[in-house]
Image: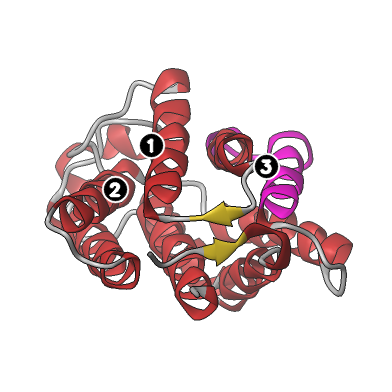
Amino acid sequence: MQKMNNSAAGEIVVSMARAIIDNRAYLSEIDGKIGDGDHGINMAKGFGLVADRIRGKELSLAKALETLGTVLMTEIGGSMGPLYGVMFTEFAQQIDQVDQIDSKTFSRMLHAGLTGIQEIGSAKVGDKTLLDTLVPAVEAFDKATSEGKSFDEALELLVAAAESGRDSTVNLIARIGRASRLGERSLGVLDAGATSCALILKELSEGTRDRLQ
């Protein structure tokens, strides 16, 4: 059975930060079309702070995710800080005492993060939010493992589902947050949260795949 060593995987969070920072302008550009235009700025600020604190340290994935969650909840503005902060904190709690992360543990981690977001917000799939990326990604991962696919294959399918979910937001009307006031004028634009979520899930999945034993 494929597994990843938790203690050696903290650098995955640095890779997440790099992806967010590299796409800072793009995320803010998307957000500016139907929102406040600060999504990329705020996300890059939070992820950048974390990367500076953990880079070069041999942290577990659990500790790195805990640090990320805390910073996003306490040190950045916007509506996304608390949502992502809760998600990463829930991720960290699920793997805190786990030495070797297998597909079942990874699934529990994903579900805990998803539940955390759902418990502090009212959004659902179809509302043009990050859930349009996260929910199909989690479902695809679970479906793959239930069908007997390897951890590696399930992670690959997770990324594909996340990116498909992200792309689906172009054809959705925003029903949550500032963008919801635009009604049908929110059509034709990617949701910034769904886009950043796809970036995060891709880095998390690829970082895990690279470390599977």
Say what amino acid the circle numbered 1 marks.
His
What kind of element bears circle 2?
helix
Give the SS element for disc 3. Answer: helix
Q: Position of residue 20 (x, y in %)?
A: 58, 68
Q: Between marks 3 and 2, how big is the CA–CA gap?
A: 19 Å
Residue drawn at (65%, 67%) of the image: 17
Q: Which residue appears at 36% of the width and 50% of the height?
A: 34
Q: Callout 3, which amino acid? A: Gly
Q: In the image, 98: left or right of 157?
A: right
- Asked if residue 80 lies in the magenta stretch, the reply is yes
Q: How far from the left and from the top, in percent, is residue 146?
A: 16, 50
**Residues at circles 3 and 1 in contact by the CB criterion of under 8 Å:** no
SS for callout 1: helix
Dots 3, 2 in contact, CB < 8 A: no
At horizontal 69% and vertical 35% (from top left) the residue drawn is 73
Q: Are marks 2 and 1 in contact (CB under 8 Å)?
A: yes
Check disc 1: other Cα within 10 Å, few if <14, some if 14-19, many if 20+: many
Instruction: Quickly name the residue at label 2.
Output: 138
Q: Which residue is label 3 attached to?
A: 69
